[in-house]
Amino acid sequence: MTHDEAFDFRPRPGRVRDRGGRGSDSRSFVAQVMRAATKANGGPLTLAEMRGERQFGSARKRPRKGRCSRIGRGQAVADRLKRMAAERAPAQRMRRVVVKARIVRLKVGSRAADAHIRYLQRDGTTRDGERGQLYGTDTDAADGKAFTERGREDRHQFRFIVAPEDGDRLSDLRAFTRDVMQQMEEDLGTRLDWVAVEHFNTGHPHSHVIVRGRDDRGKDLIIAQDYITDSVRLRAQERATLELGPETDHELRAKLRAEVSAERFTRIDRAILEEAAEQVLDLRPQSGQVRGDFDRSLRIGRLQTLERYGLARQTEPGVWTLSERLEPTMRELGERGDIVKAINRALAARGQERGPEAVSLHGEEIGTPIVGRVIDKGLTDEFGDRIGVVIDGIDGRVHHASLPDSSTAADASIGAIVEVGRANSQRLADRNIAAVARGTGVYRPSEHRALAEGDNIRVPRGSYDAYVGAHVRRLEALRRAGIVERLDADRWLIPEDFEARAAVYEAAQGRRAQMRVLCAYDLDRQVTSDGATWLDRQLVSRDRGSLATNGFGAEARQALERRSDELVRQGNASRTAHGQLRIKSDLIGTLARQEAERVGRQLAADRGLTFQPIHEGQAVRGKLLGSAQLASGRFAMIDDGLGFSLVPWRPVLDKEIGRQVMGVMRGGDISWQLGRARGLGIGL
């Protein structure tokens, strides 16, 4: 073939990574980021904002509203309502309505939304102290389960709290909420799928509204931030004002006077912070501030209240210096007051009363574990999934703790015996594992069992399988943290710095409050139960020194005596000639098996199946149907197609409901094998 220069191929390379099309973005990565940030911020970023610095007065002023993206439904309505609010005459004072809003991202497979609705319907929230009832657009008895099932695939949901300041004067809070939601639908141009519940358990009646994150076409519902931030509140104020009329000067003055001594963050505090320059408020007449005598007296009275808390100080006549901790401290005091009121309500419902010295508030961090009876629980922030539990402790004190995850409190009913703040740290187990693996870097459960038996180590209930199983469960938790590696069922690869890394892992976990149910039954049911109760474990341990002689501790002491008599009647214990209680060996295991077989046969009969008890060393495999809460603890319900079995539950099974599982009974517990990718894993 002859050479033809007309067909020479001469490439002309462009810029690196330049596709050459008109739609390509040749700007630098930094330029693209800055453009996206400017769009999200609602305007160009200042140099101080880019550096993360505070501008002058930013510690006192709140962020400007409407600075985020204006994308979403309702932006035009929000702009119009803002203009109307700015043009409204001072005499047309609107009724005050507090609206809190939150957009909650929903995780695939998570049941947090279900738990949130259940806690909104908890007992003691209605006018009569009964369980809350969900309602919707055209029903007074909405189905919460059906609502969450409809939104199972939603990306997000909206949660609102609508609290009219004069809610106790509204003729019908439910009708008021429906009117607000109907107005929202008109503003957003779409039907909304929502449910709500009324709460009357605080000083101000309010409604919780949950809105699905889907519009009437099934697409993601995106609401403009300005509408969520301001317009829902303005629409609610319009409705409240329409029913009750504009707020009078007399009403406003009475409300402001009540705020002078309030132990919470108030409107007066907000006004003081906005007027203060560099944490200094000048109330002298010559300072140029124009305000009426009433406003000045309100501020001085409030400052004197804040001075008692160490949050304000008069440096010279008329000049006050404010603490930087003023707002967070007063908000914390308000939250503390709400918690104390909840504790007092829970005690009053039981006909009890405790002094302030017998109340302990722990937050999310607990040092010494708390054991006691659950007497109340509810959402701490009324928005998210953090649960606050009130526990009548065996130490004679009443405790309040916040749990970071609502699912941990789902199984703890009122009256159940629980332990909160139990340390996850198993440092003794870590030392044992390191000792067995020393020299080889491999931990073998079989070797550990042989060493424990050879050294005649005393183990709980005399079960070496359960003793070693506890160490394996510890390793499984550390495997998920990436600290150890499981080679096979009897070999674990242990790093040289194992103990140090395990200690760092525990430090990272912190001492966040965690709760486990010791017994789902109250004391009266435990006394007559045929299962292994918390009272039985107290009798076996014979450690009654931690039981106080007052409060729940005294009740537990009396219940132990009644339980002892019941065990004698059942034939599981006897009394000596001197009246001492003599308990049969392996009482806990015997009672647990006895109860599991009784309940298992009942459940199997209801389902038309054959009950199959599981014995030591036996393998169990089948479909995990769910769980059953017994006096002896929580048990997994396994259906292998031919029969039905009850075996001890582990938290690792929470995500396996409806799937095939397999495990082996060892030492009264189950070693679970959950899929090829996970291998043999024993949950904590």
Image (cartoon, rainbow, N blue to C red):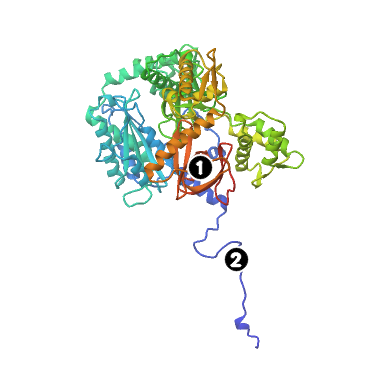
171 left or right of 569? left
Name which of mark 2 and mark 1 comes first in the sequence.
2
* Residue 420 image position (x, y, % from top left): 51, 27
Farthest residue to the right: give it: 439
Query: To which residue does mark 2 refer?
Result: 14
* Residue 98 image position (x, y, % from top left): 35, 30
674 left or right of 136? right
Name the foreground residue: 162 vs 238: 162
Task: Look at the image and tell me in which quarter the N terminus lies.
Answer: bottom right
Q: Determine if residue 308 is in view.
A: no
Farthest residue to the front: give it: 577
Query: To which residue does mark 1 refer?
Result: 653
Tell me the tag on residue 246.
Answer: none
* Residue 585 image position (x, y, % from top left): 57, 27
Name the foreground residue: 163 vs 582: 582
Q: Quadrant of residue 603?
A: top left
Q: Quadrant of residue 140?
A: top left
**Label 2 is placed on what type of residue?**
Gly
Which residue is located at x 50 percent, y 38 percent?
Answer: 649
**Label 1 is placed on what type of residue?**
Leu
Element type at marker 1?
A: helix
Question: Against 6, is 42 above or below?
Answer: above
Question: Against 682, is 579 above or below?
Answer: above
Q: Determine if residue 535 is in view.
A: yes
